[in-house]
Image: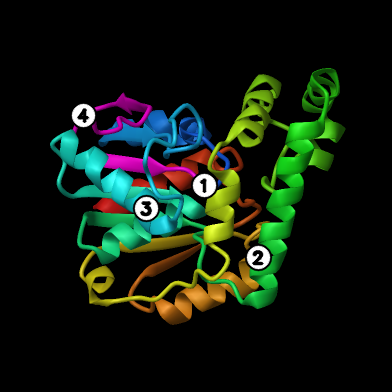
Amino acid sequence: MPQELVHERRGAGEPMVLIHGLGSRWQVWLPVLDAVAAHHEVIALDLPGFGASPPGGTPPTLDGLATAVEKFLARNGIQRAHLAGNSLGGGIALELGRRGAARSVTAFSPIGFWAVAGRHWSRAALTASRGLARRIPPRAAARLAASPAGRAAALSLFYGRTSGLDPQSVLADVAALAGAAYFDPVRRSLRDHLFTTNSELDAIPVTIAWGTRDVLLTYRTQSRRARALLPAARHVTLPGCGHLPFSDNPQLCAKLIIRTTE
């Protein structure tokens, strides 16, 4: 029986699919969900092996995850959707655009534009964060999440602004990172992944957005490579935003997603 991905569906109009990053879950899009749903039917999903979606038989690779999303959309009667993705999800959205399966792509800090040093850094940093999420006692995690200083110390790798984060959402995100069944195999599979373009992406609207405080997939070097490899895309800088920019500046992020589809 085909695997159904756990997802949240809101709004009406042309379908817009939101794809999270490595170790994350669909709820990372909550700060922008309702604003985008005012213009589109929004489907925010948990990738296989992440959030509440089981791995099923999906290969733990970028191609395998992209195919799982493509099949999920086909089962739901959606042939070509607008896509927005973050990090790994941005890489998946670009891959689906390469396949001709997207009407538009908005990619926030997508993977694949790193050099060797940047790839090693991001893998090591994410692995360390995953290790901390799995080892930290629940009471200590709750104290960190409740404290502005604790959130800043623990989450500055991901966010440009941590002071306004909801402590309960932080704890749920930490639990999702710790429990992601596909974290390790997908991380290993991305060891040699590099973005390569083709003409399909030149035929659709593509926006690449990078936060100036993204220290996981570093803004200055990786956004510069994205500009070189995707010269026909619209490249946007998100001032003061981190790797997960949606709570840093939800209005700007929602505006970018909607504008790309127009």
User: Which amino acid is tagged 1?
Assistant: Gly
Asked whether disc 3 touches disc 1, contact meaning CB atoms under 8 Å apart, the reply is: no
- Seen at 73% across and 55% down, the residue is 125
Classify residue 6 as left or right of residue 248. left
Residue bearing the label numbered 4: 12
User: Which amino acid is tagged 2?
Assistant: Thr
Residue bearing the label numbered 1: 21
- Considering only order in the chain, which callout, 1 or 4, is on the residue closer to the N terminus? 4
User: Which amino acid is tagged 3?
Assistant: Gly
- Considering only order in the chain, which callout, 2 or 4, is on the residue closer to the N terminus? 4
Mark sitting on residue 157: none
User: Between tags 3 and 1, which lies in front?
Assistant: 3
Using the numbered discs, state the Cα–Cα distance from disc 3 to disc 4 in whole angstroms.
29 Å
- Considering only order in the chain, which callout, 2 or 3, is on the residue closer to the N terminus? 3
Q: Residues within 10 Å of mark 1 (few under 14, many from 20)?
A: many
Using the numbered discs, state the Cα–Cα distance from disc 4 to disc 2 in whole angstroms.
35 Å
Q: Residues within 10 Å of mark 2 (few under 14, many from 20)?
A: many
- Quadrant in which the N terminus is drawn: top left
> Does any portion of residue 28 appear in the rendered image?
yes
User: Between tags 3 and 4, which lies in front?
Assistant: 3
The scheme the figure's colours follow is rainbow
Q: Which residues are magenta?
A: 1-21
Residue bearing the label numbered 3: 64
Identify which residue, 250 or 76, lies in the foreground.
76
- Considering only order in the chain, which callout, 1 or 2, is on the residue closer to the N terminus? 1
